[in-house]
Image (cartoon, grey):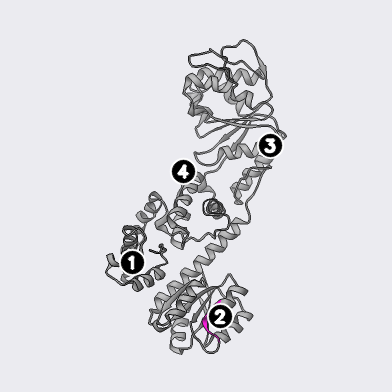
Amino acid sequence: MKLAVLIAEGDPFVRGKLCEALEASGHTATAVEDSETALSRLGESTFDVVVSAVWTSRVDGMALLHSIKQQTAATAVILIGSRDEGSAVEAALKADVDDHVIKPFDIRDLVLRIERVGERRRIGAELRAARARPVTVGAGSKLIGDGPAMRSLIQRVETIAPASASVMIVGESGTGKELVARAIHEASPRAAGRFVAVNCAAFPEALIEAELFGHERGAFTGAVHRREGRFKAADGGTLLLDEVGEIPHGVQAKLLRVLQEGVIEPLGSNRQQALDVRLICATHRNLKQLILAGKFREDLYYRLNVLDVHVPPLRQRRADLAVLVSHFHQRFAGEHAEPRIAPRAWAVLMNYSFPGNVRELEHAIQHAVVLSRGSEIDVWHLPYDMRGEAQAEEPSRSLFRPLHDSMRDFERQCLLVALHQSKGVKLEAARLLGISRKTLWEKLRMYQLGSREE
């Protein structure tokens, strides 16, 4: 990602070295000697990142920070301070500066910080834009996504919803088949009726027939009351048979009769009840293979599969990842919480195969929101299986890493372990590490690690 960087620094040597390093890394750099000139340049051009000394000539870095926050919120700010400017740096951090460094510092480290802040801004902007564009179908259901695969699915839902024919929804576990069924119902003329869903795999063979068609009192052991089945409950609306491939062979014959004649006969009764139900079935299994194995009736299959819908797996919906992450972050962190995800955590999400599909992503974001406690979501906050896959791939890319990077990662890991053992209490974490509380505070800010006050 090429960044446009504005540097406001009174030291010409620092200005020159930083410009040289940024341009060598493929970025564009504009250097000025004070914040007053920087404010003027901001009015003329757009910059991704502003790097400013805390005190530079007549307009200090804090004034520059406040001006940027008011005028160009998309621009990131990194402040350069010295150790005798501790109170000013602390005030800047409270004012939500994106990052800061203390002189003397390594130019290469500052360039990495600039790139990291720029990438965070890009990811944040993408997530905010994604939150503003969920795609809805029907009065109350949401199919979230705007990638080609999702738009094709939405178009198919809109096309088949007005019909009354049976629908077969096929897709891997966790892709949202029930959500698609609800969207079909909500966009259909039956939207005012009930939507009833039953998981056919959740009931033993002895009970699934009674669950679907109802039973009279005394129809079987334990039937102490008369009970209407799910078909009756969905009369005038839509019935979803989830995991329809798990229906026992004997019950399949009765289901076929219901579809042919439009009536049900509860267990223990000889009276028939006429029904008006649209049937939607869902499965993650290959029903044609079950037919060949003699486990599913071929005539029932063609009765159920009048209209078909294929729900794509998440690995085929990479374009929808940002809007899904934003949606789940909003659900678990709160409507007004800003989604903040570190670039390496975002890289893990983008490269992960998601065998559990959207459901796995939902649980991963919930996991990360809980562990991050309102701070930026980093790779350490993601589930172990997810980040474990990324770690396993790392050695294949490069056997060696720069010593500077390895030492920083080791120091960061030590901080995480100390925070974990101290349950987030900074004073105890500093004691375990053998450093002062002030040093710990500076390192936590450097690595952007959050922890609660003791």
Q: In the rendered view, tell whether residue 299 sits above or below residue 239.
A: above
Residue placed under numbered mark 1 in the picture: 427
For marks 3 and 2, the one nearer the N-term is 2
Residue placed under numbered mark 4 in the picture: 356
Bin the neighbour count of mark 4 within 10 Å (Cα to Cα): few under 14, some 14-19, many 20 and up: some
Bin the neighbour count of mark 3 within 10 Å (Cα to Cα): few under 14, some 14-19, many 20 and up: many
Bin the neighbour count of mark 2 within 10 Å (Cα to Cα): few under 14, some 14-19, many 20 and up: many
Helix, strand or loop at disc 4?
loop
Secondary structure mostly taken by the magenta-highlighted segment of the chain: helix
- How far apart, in angstroms, are the residues tagged by discs 2 and 4? 47 Å
Helix, strand or loop at disc 2?
helix
Q: In the rendered view, tell whether residue 60 sits above or below residue 279.
A: below
The amino acid sitting under disc 4 is Gly
The amino acid sitting under disc 2 is Leu
- How far apart, in angstroms, are the residues tagged by discs 1 and 2? 34 Å
Residue extent of the magenta highlight:
59-65
395 with respect to 129 (left or right)? left
For marks 1 and 2, the one nearer the N-term is 2
- How far apart, in angstroms, are the residues tagged by discs 3 and 2? 55 Å
Helix, strand or loop at disc 1?
helix
* Residue 24 visible within the image: no
For marks 1 and 4, the one nearer the N-term is 4
Checking the image for residue 64, the label placed there is: 2
For marks 3 and 4, the one nearer the N-term is 3
Closer to the camera: disc 1 or disc 4? 1
Closer to the camera: disc 2 or disc 4? 2
- How far apart, in angstroms, are the residues tagged by discs 1 and 4? 41 Å
Bin the neighbour count of mark 1 within 10 Å (Cα to Cα): few under 14, some 14-19, many 20 and up: some
Checking the image for residue 161, the label placed there is: 3
- How far apart, in angstroms, are the residues tagged by discs 3 and 1? 61 Å
19 or 446: nearer the viewer: 446
